[in-house]
Image (tube, helix red, strand yellow):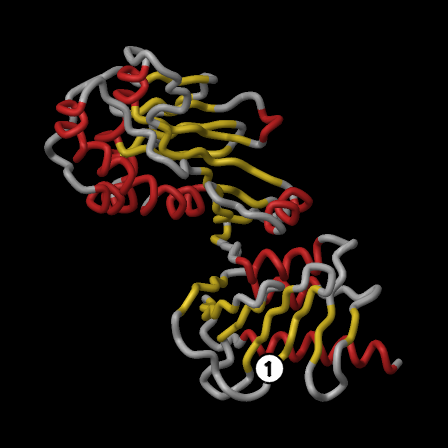
Amino acid sequence: MNNYKKITASVLLAAIAAFSPAVSLAGDVGAACISEREAACYQYENDGFRLFVPKAYDDLLVTEIVKDRKGGKLFCVSEKTSIEAAKKLPYDTRGAGWLFSIGQIDEGRRRELLCGDMSGAEIFARDAVGRTYVFYHPTDVRYMRENTEAMKRDQKQWSMLNEWAWTSVREDFCRENGFTAITYDNSAVGMAIARAVYQPDTSYTISTTQYGPIEAKSFDAIPYAERLIQNASYERTDCEAPDGEYVVLAFPDEGTRFDFFKAEGKENYVREVRQDGMELLYKATFSDDKEKASAVMQAWYDALTAQRHN
């Protein structure tokens, strides 16, 4: 028997209630939602998509079920007390209390997003027909109270709700909707790789000492690019750049290149060299720890040379 509370109205405003002292940590509630879902969570539904909210938090939130699907949004969740406090303040407080939104995008939009800075958006899931799902979040603080005293008083509540939003929501949404968890890198390295394969007018070359630079023309490099940016991240590091050979991904029109090092044990180090001479070093991490960034780039280069020689 289904004991979930199903809510299908376009906008739900939860009534204010006292916070339950029985649950004090987001991790505790997340575990309860997994093992005792029916007792611990409310279910919100939008066009067949389900979002679970712990009952201990529900009265603290405003959960909007977005019916205007033009922007691809499904759910929008904010802290109720921040919204109420914002109404009493004499300045623009739009977006007060916003914690996160979840949206759906198609393949074209996914590719477009990955070519630019995705601050405030994280791709986190994919469904069986190839649509992807985005976790949208603020890039500034949306915590609102009427005064400093109230902010100090409620800081624990705000932090708790943010912890739940960041640590539990995406995993729960994937599981309950039967989606596959997936992420994409959006560093300078990831954006450059995405532009190379998703934007047809982007000019790039790949080179090694073997045959020199080869320009990609009429070549489907998407499988190589997605191995490099899917379920991967490139983080800045202050280490010294490795010695030895590397595969170069260069963008002549931008005056930028990326060197993928081949030295044993250093195959996931990438150096960005900008037009102004600035150099930055990144280290790639893949969910598949056997993947090596420079090996993928070498395979991409080998495929290009094979095409040129045919």
Residue 18 placement (x, y as % from top left) = 15, 21
Mark 1: give few (<14), some (14-19) or many (20+) Cα within 10 Å. many
Task: Please count the marks in the image.
Answer: 1
Specify the amino acid type for callout 1.
Tyr
Kindly identify which residue carries mark 1: 246
Front one among 117 and 170: 117
Q: Tell me the quarter of the image containing the N terminus.
A: top left
Residue at 34% over, 22% down: 62
Judge whether residue 22 can be spotted in this image. yes
Q: Is residue 72 left or right of residue 99?
A: right
Which secondary structure lies at badge 1? strand
- Work out which residue is located at the far right of the displayed protein and give it: 310
Front one among 290 and 259: 259
Above or below: residue 294 compared with residue 1: below
Residue at 52% over, 46% down: 118
Judge whether residue 59 can be spotted in this image. no
- Work out which residue is located at the far front of the displayed protein and give it: 276
Residue 101 placement (x, y as % from top left) = 44, 33
Residue 38 placement (x, y as % from top left) = 29, 35
Residue at 79% over, 80% down: 305
Residue 76 placement (x, y as % from top left) = 43, 28
Above or below: residue 130 compared with residue 303: above
Above or below: residue 134 compared with residue 270: above
Q: Is residue 269 left or right of residue 116?
A: left
Picture quadrant of residue 240: bottom left
Front one among 4 and 113: 113
